[in-house]
Amino acid sequence: MSMFLLAGLVSVPSTSAATPTMKVHFINVGQGDATYIKMPGGEDVLIDGGRQGQGDEVIAYLKKQKVDDIEIMIATHPDADHLGGLDEVLKAYKVESVYAPKVAHTTDAYANFLKAVKAEKLTIKTAKVGVKLPLKTVMAKFVGPTRDYGKTDLNNWSAVLHVTYNKNKFLFTGDAEKASEADMVKAKQTLLADVIKVGHHGAKTSSNADFLKAVKPKYAVISVGKNAYGHPTAEVLNRYKPYKAAVYRTDQKGNIIFTSTGTKITVATVK
């Protein structure tokens, strides 16, 4: 048999790579928010970091996921249960960009966050409607806040991020409440999402009917811990029922991880 024929029998490994996945980790930080996203293009994105003193928990989780740096950090709004741990994350990791809405607060948590940003020689980029994140493979843009909500209405200032990976869509709402939700609907923002991070830990002031009608969620994630507010309220849980949305709560399931291929979503929970 000639060498040419032999060569024809040699199997050549396929060069087609597997479809990259997007992994969304809703980290169990109790009554607070912290979401880590490994984008299909390889970038690491962190939305919020739990309460003050929880930075070490968030860092430990990120290290377990083998995160070496963070391309984008988003502080949805100045509440301590959202940005409280971000100062520690900024000290522990090289962070390339920080986004936050243009509203200030007088708390220690907010002051520590600003100090940590300054220490890293970073300038906060404004998170507001229409701003797109520089990410490969996905379309990620802020759909809120759409306007100025004054100095006291911090929840409605929440940076609301919509991420589209091929056919799969995710919506991260911070603590956005009725006014912001209504404004996003009125502004005809892209809100349709397979997965929604339920606004304000399941408070009845969020997840309003017109907003959910625009989102049409298949999965609803509630980041919540032991609290005196009654979160999540029965009223809010009932609002998701018409959509037959599968509801996942961090206080019941621990860490909640969604994996998207762009066309298919799977979910796992880890206590």
Image (spheres, helix red, strand yellow):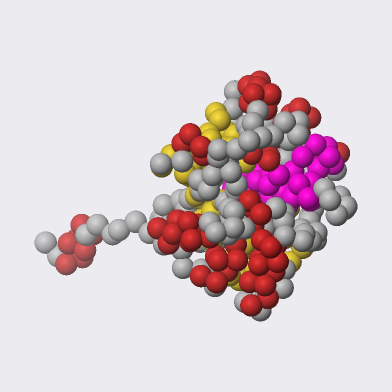
Within the image, what quadrant is residue 216 found in?
A: top right
196 or 26, which is in the foreground? 26
The percent coordinates of residue 47 (x first, y second) are 61, 55
Q: Is residue 253 left or right of residue 82?
A: left
Instruction: Look at the image and tell me in which quarter the C terminus lies.
Output: top left
The percent coordinates of residue 225 (x first, y second) are 55, 40
What are the residue bounds of the magenta stretch? 154-183
Q: Is residue 167 magenta?
A: yes
Q: Is residue 64 magenta?
A: no
Total number of numbered labels? 0
The percent coordinates of residue 62 (x first, y second) are 46, 59
Question: Could you tell me which residue is drawn at 65 percent across and 46 percent down?
Answer: 172
| Observer able to see residue 195 | no
Instruction: Look at the image and tell me in which quarter the N terminus lies.
Output: bottom left
The percent coordinates of residue 36 (x first, y second) are 54, 54
Question: Could you tell me which residue is drawn at 60 percent across and 66 percent down?
Answer: 87
* Residue 160 against residue 125 in the figure, above or below: above
Question: Could you tell me which residue is drawn at 53 percent across and 56 percent down?
Answer: 54
